[in-house]
Amino acid sequence: MKTKIWLSTFAVVMAAMVIGCKPKGAQSTLAGDAANKVYVPPGQHDEFYNLVSGGFNGQMSVVGLPSGRTLKILPVFSVHPENGWGYSEESKPMLNTANGFVPWDDLHHISVSTTNAEHDGRWAFANGNNTPRIARVDLTTFKTVEIIEIPNSAGNHSSPYITENTEYVVAGTRFSVPTGEDRDVSIDSYKDNFKGTISFLSVDKNSGHMDIAFQIEAPPFNFDLARAGKKKSHGWFFFSTYNTEMAHTLLEVNASQRDKDYIMAVNWKRAEEYIKEGKGKKIKAPYAHNVWDEETHMATSTIKENILSLDPTELKDILYFIPCPKSPHGTDTDPTGEYIIGSGKLAAIIPVFSFTKMLEAIENEDFEGTIGGMPVLNYESVLHGEVEKPGLGPLHTEFDGRGNAYTSMFVSSEVVKWNIETLEVLDRVPTYYSVGHLMIPGGPTGNPHGKYMVAYNKITKDRYLPTGPELAHSAQLYDISGDKMQLLLDFPTIGEPHYAEAFPASLIKDKQVKFYPMEHNNHPRALKGINDARVERDGNNVHVYMTSIRSNFRPDNIEGVRLGDEVYFHVTNLEQDWDVPHGFAIKGANTAEILIMPGETATLKWVPDRVGVFPFYCTDFCSALHQEMQGYIRVSSADSNVPIKYLTGEAE
Ligand code: CUA
C-alpha cells in the first residue's frame, strides 16, 4: 500500500517535471488543437499553394498549406539533375546570359501575377540575384517558361515586384555600378561614376512574354526591396534604399551613418507619358532573353542589344524621395494602397506613410531638399504616424485584410501584429529563430486571405534532429484568424527561403496540364510512333531517334558509334496519360538524366570517351517491367567500319 502511494506521488512529480522541462515557448504558444488545424487527412488536398523561394539553391519549392508538405521542387535558375533542367539540350538555352551559360543563381523573391490587385494564378515571377535575371513560371505546368536578364544591374535584390494588373514586373539593382561606355573606373570614384537603375519589364497580357520596356537611372544608392502602389496608388512604385551615404567600403559602418535613408517613389504612369512623347534614349546594354516553347518542347535564347533609358534629372516629376529611418529593408503597401510602410533595420519605430499626404506634399512642393535636382519630401508631411516600440530589427510587413499589419522582427525574433489606422501594437509571438520574410496568403495583394501567416526563419539551431553542420532552414505556420496569433507547425524548407507567396489552391488546381498532347508535339526530332524509331549518322553526329513507352526503348541495341562521335538521344515519351514520365540515363555520361513528360521530346547529348558497350535505362519506376526498360550502345574505335545498326523490337 505504502509503495503504491509513493509511486503515484512519484508519477505526479515526474509529470510536473516533464511539463517544466519543455523548451521555452513551446508550451505557451502551442495550443492543444494545433495538430487538427494542420492535419490534412490522407487523400485530401491542402487549402493553399505556397510558392517558396529557394535562395541559394536557385529553385522554388511548392508547399501545401496548412500541412507544410513539399509538393515539388521547381528548377528556375539552377540546374536540376532530377529532371534534367539545364542538362537536356532543350533546356540549356534557358540558362544563357550575356556572360554565357550560368547554371546557378540566388532566388530571393516571388510574385504571383495579379489582375485588379488580386492573384489571378497565371504566372509566378522570381528574381535571380547574382547574375540579374527575372524568370516567369507557368502555373498550369509549374515550369519555368521565360528568363530575361537585367543589364546595368548587379545584385537584382529589389525584384521581381509587379504592378496591380501585372503590366510590369520591376527590378531594382542592389549594387550601384558603372553603367556608361567606360566601365574601367576607380572604385573610389563611386559617387561620380556609379549609378543605380530601376528596370520596368512589360508583361504581355495574353502570352506573359516579358521585355525591358524602360530603365530609370537613379542615384548610386543600394536598392533593397519594393512594392507597387495599388488601387488609389496604382501608377506608383515604392523602393526602399540604403547606403544613401554612397559608401563603397565597409558598408556595415559607413552605410549606417545617416538617421534617415529614403523610400524612392516612382511615378511610372508619368514615365510612360514621357516615353509616348519620345523622351528617353536608347543605350547599348546586351542582355539575354530566353523563352520556352511548350509545343516544340525547347528553349531559344536571343541576345538583345539596347534598352530605353530615362534620366530623372531631366524628367523631373518621375522620382521623389521620402525620408525613412534607418537603413530600410522592406517597403510594403497595405491592401487599400493608402499606406506605405518602411521597415528600418536599425530603426526603433515603424514609420507609416500616407499616399494621400505624399500627393499633397508633391502638389504643395513641400520639399526639404533635392538629390540631383529630384525632390526630397518632408518626413513629417508624408507621415501617417509611427508604430512605437514594435520590437527590434523590423524587416517586412504583410497584411490580413482586416486592417492589421504583421511585421517580422529579425533582432528580437518575433512577429508583431499592429493596427494600420491606430498604429497600436495588438499582439506579438516569438519565432524560432530570427525571422526574415513572413507571408500571409494574398498578403501583398488587395485581397489577403488572413487565415495563416508563415514565418521564414534565418536560424534553425535545435528545431529538428541535428544533421551535421548544415541544417535545413525553418518555416513556422501560425493561425492568425483570431485576435491572438497561434503557432501551429514547424516545417523544414529547401535551400534558404526568402519571400514566398500563397494563394487558394482552387485558383489553379483544376487548370493543371496532365500531359502534352502528341498531336501538338512540334519538336523537330519528335517521333509520332514506335515505327519511326531509328539511328542516323550526320558526319560525326549520331542522332538516336528513340521512343519510350511502358516498358521499352526503341531502338534498344545500337551499334556503329565511333570514338570522336557526339551522340544525341532524342527521346519521345509516347504515353498520353497523367503521371507517366520516363527517364533516360546512360553509363558514364558527364551530365544528368533527362526526365521526359508524357507527349514530350527531350535530348541528352553523350560524347563517348572509350570503346565498349554501354547500358542505358529508364530511371523513373514506370511499370511492373520498369527494370526491363533498358538497352545497350556499342562504341567502336575511331577507325572502325562497324556500320550503324539498331534493333527496334524485333524478336530474338
Ligand atoms: Cu520507363 Cu521506368
Image (tube, rainbow, N blue to C red):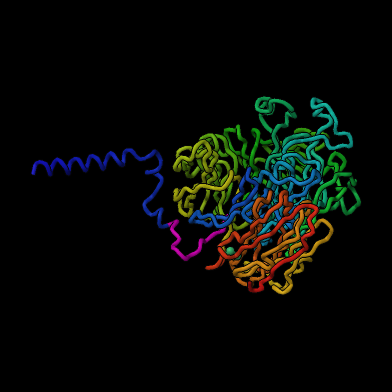
Q: Quadrant of ligand 1?
A: bottom right
Q: Height in image: 176 above or below 118?
A: above
Range covered by the magenta-colored residues = 37-51
Q: Position of residue 308 (x, y in %)?
A: 86, 48
Q: Position of residue 619 (x, y in %)?
A: 59, 59
Depth check: give the residue in front, 606 or 272: 606
Depth check: give the residue in front, 568 or 350: 568
Q: Position of residue 417 (x, y in %)?
A: 51, 45
- Name the outermost residue toward the left: 1
Q: Position of residue 438 (x, y in %)?
A: 56, 46
Residue at 75% x, 29% y is 246
- Residue 568 lies in quadrant: bottom right
Q: Height in image: 360 above or below 234?
A: above
- Residue 321 lies in quadrant: top right
Residue at 52% x, 50% y is 453
The C terminus: image quadrant: bottom right
Query: Quick check: is 609 in the magenta stretch?
Result: no
Residue at 49% x, 49% y is 491
- Residue 325 lies in quadrant: top right
Q: Is residue 12 visible?
A: yes
Depth check: give the residue in front, 324 or 45: 45
Residue at 9% x, 41% y is 2
